Image (spheres, rainbow, N blue to C red):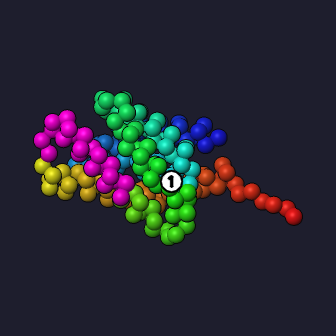
Amino acid sequence: MAYAIGIPVVALLAILQSALVSQFRLADGQADLVLVAVVAWGLTGRSTEAMVFGMIGGILLDLLSALPIGTTSLILVLIAYLVSLTEGRLWGAHLLTPLGVVFAASLGFAGYQLLASALAGAGIDLPTVASRVILPEAFLNVLLAVPAAQLALALQRALFPPEVEIG
């Protein structure tokens, strides 16, 4: 059931990220909706689904941005895996946990993109890119972190209610 809801949602987020969110920038950075959604679902402890959503979302982002297929999927699946290692226990630790996790995931995502650009031969002015792109993107992603994590947790509880023993 999670795939029936999650895959269309990730597809919609990829389209919104490419078509709409790219028009609203802070400095030169934009929010990464698919990254935030994958991290939020990973925080619920549903690791396999989070990795599938990361793979599909990454492929769709690559198709919509003309990047080689799989470029974004690789880092999104890795981030989903790392976030899911806690098996959902990290969320209960503190309400602000998603902020730190999304911030770290945003920095990892941006670092991967910088590495891919450098390997492709692009000249990168790291101080400018950090101040105009990476930090604004991380800030925007952090703004979306708590609502996304709350929504993912509510959806996870609705789709997978805890088992109750009568005894």
| Residue drawn at the location 12% of the way across and 49% of the way down | 125
Q: Please, what is the three-letter code of the amino acid marked with disc 1?
A: Ser
Q: Residue furthest bottom?
A: 94
Q: Pick the residue in front: 123 or 27.
A: 123
Quadrant that contains the C terminus: bottom right
Q: Is residue 158 magenta?
A: no
85 relative to 14, above or below? below
Residue where numbered disc 1 is placed: 84
Question: Is residue 82 in view from this perspective?
Answer: yes
Q: Residue furthest right?
A: 167
Q: What range of the chain is rendered magenta? A: 104-124
Q: Dot 1, how many residues are within 10 Å of its Cα: few (below 14), some (14-19), or many (20+)?
A: many
Secondary structure category for the residue under label 1: helix
Residue drawn 53% across the image and 37% down it: 7
The residue at the point 41 percent across, 33 percent down is 60
User: Where is residue 148 shown, x and y percent of the image?
Assistant: 48, 55
Q: Nearer the viewer, residue 152 or 91?
A: 91
Q: Is residue 140 visible?
A: no
Where does the image place residue 12, in percent across and percent down from the top left? 47, 38
